[in-house]
Amino acid sequence: MQNKVRFLGLDVHAETIAVAVAEPDGSVRSLGTTANRADSIRKLVKKLGPVEQLKACYEAGPTGYVLFWQLAELGVQCEVIAPTLMPVKAGDRVKTDRRDAERLARSFRSGDLTAVWVPDAGSEALRDLVRAREAAKQDQLRARHRLSKFLLRSGQRPAAGLKAWTQLYMSWVRRLRFEQAAQESTRLDYLHEVEHMAERVVRLEKAIAEAVKLASPEIQEVVKDLQALRGIAQISAVTIAAELGNITRFESARQLMGYSGAVPREDSSGKRTQRGSITKTGNAHLRRIVVESAWSYRLRPGVGPALRKRQEGVPEELKEIAWKAQNRLHKRYSKLTAAGKDQRKIITAVGRELLGFIWAIGTKAEAAAKQRKEA
């Protein structure tokens, strides 16, 4: 049966899909271009013969996983390929959709491609919501910068001890008045944008809390148990769970660290060993959230009221892992600080080790949820 399998290479764009097939006899040929629409894809699959003898692949990109889900519904086995790991000939300087599709089909048949994990529709929806909240936080920061720099240029200074962006600070900004009408209009516009961004963030955080209640039991368990770790509250836990999806797909904590792009790059040959900054060839959203959480481990190990509340209902075994994380990561931070290392590098190193504890808790949480589901 394997000898009769036809391998499809799909070069996917917003409106079109270039199609090529690697035949069982070894030939690779282009099948032209079809529209990126469900009806066109259905006609293409029907024309190519039995779905049991078809295997398709396409590169991950801005079109997402819709094509994967459509092919899965039609019974076609499909893989989404990591674009950065595609084999490329050094001397190949011609790039067209047809050649890309043929290259995909040929490499897919020879087993030279690396597939990425594809989430289900629910996990992808949760990830979209989490990333929308992240974008809102970035927009909020920009809006605040515009307002604060405008006040600085205008010579407006808050009273001593008045902390920025608190309710008292915002009340002070609302009471300000400028003699120039143009400046007053600018203040009102910047103030409105800051307030709008704050409302947007609150609205999205409420939506995330509601979405978690409707998520799969595995995601709910992971979100609950990850909050046993210091520096990881609900939003951080949901972000990690949404970005990773199925944590047990990582065979080890080291593999998860590599996925985050938080491991140092290396260029070694012979007796020469050279390591540099982190690779950053991984999930930037995951890397950002663990580095933010790593700042909490500057403090001495302890369990405060907020953390104690988050740990309610968490198994004792996972609480012990979280306590071990506090002791190990704080010791790591102190040791690197005493050695005079750069603060940013220290936090990155702590964040990388934090991923090991996230993997330990996440895999156990998913296993527990699966056992309850099967019981």
Image (tube, rainbow, N blue to C red):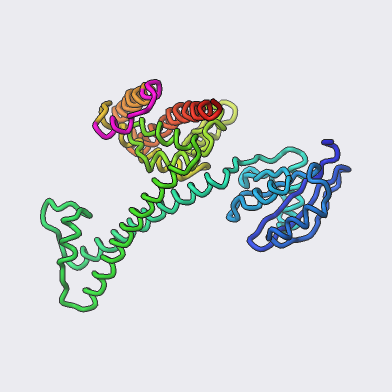
**Whole-percent x and y of residue 322?**
36, 26
In the image, farthest residue toward the left: 160
Magenta highlight range: 305-319
Magenta run includes residue 308: yes
Task: Give x and y (percent) for residue 94.
Answer: 72, 57
Question: Residue at position x 18%, y 57% from top?
Answer: 169
Q: Residue shown at 36%/24% (left/top)?
A: 319
Residue in front for this viewpoint, 113 or 212: 212
Residue 254 visible in rendering: no
Q: Is residue 47 left or right of residue 80?
A: right
Q: Is residue 113 above or below residue 65?
A: above
Would residue 261 be counted in the magenta stretch?
no
Q: Is residue 45 above or below residue 262?
A: below
For the view shown, which residue lies furthest in the bottom direction? Answer: 181
Image coordinates for residue 308, horizontal then vertical, percent:
28, 30
The quarter of the displayed image where residue 2 is located: top right
The answer to whether residue 344 is left or right of residue 300 is right
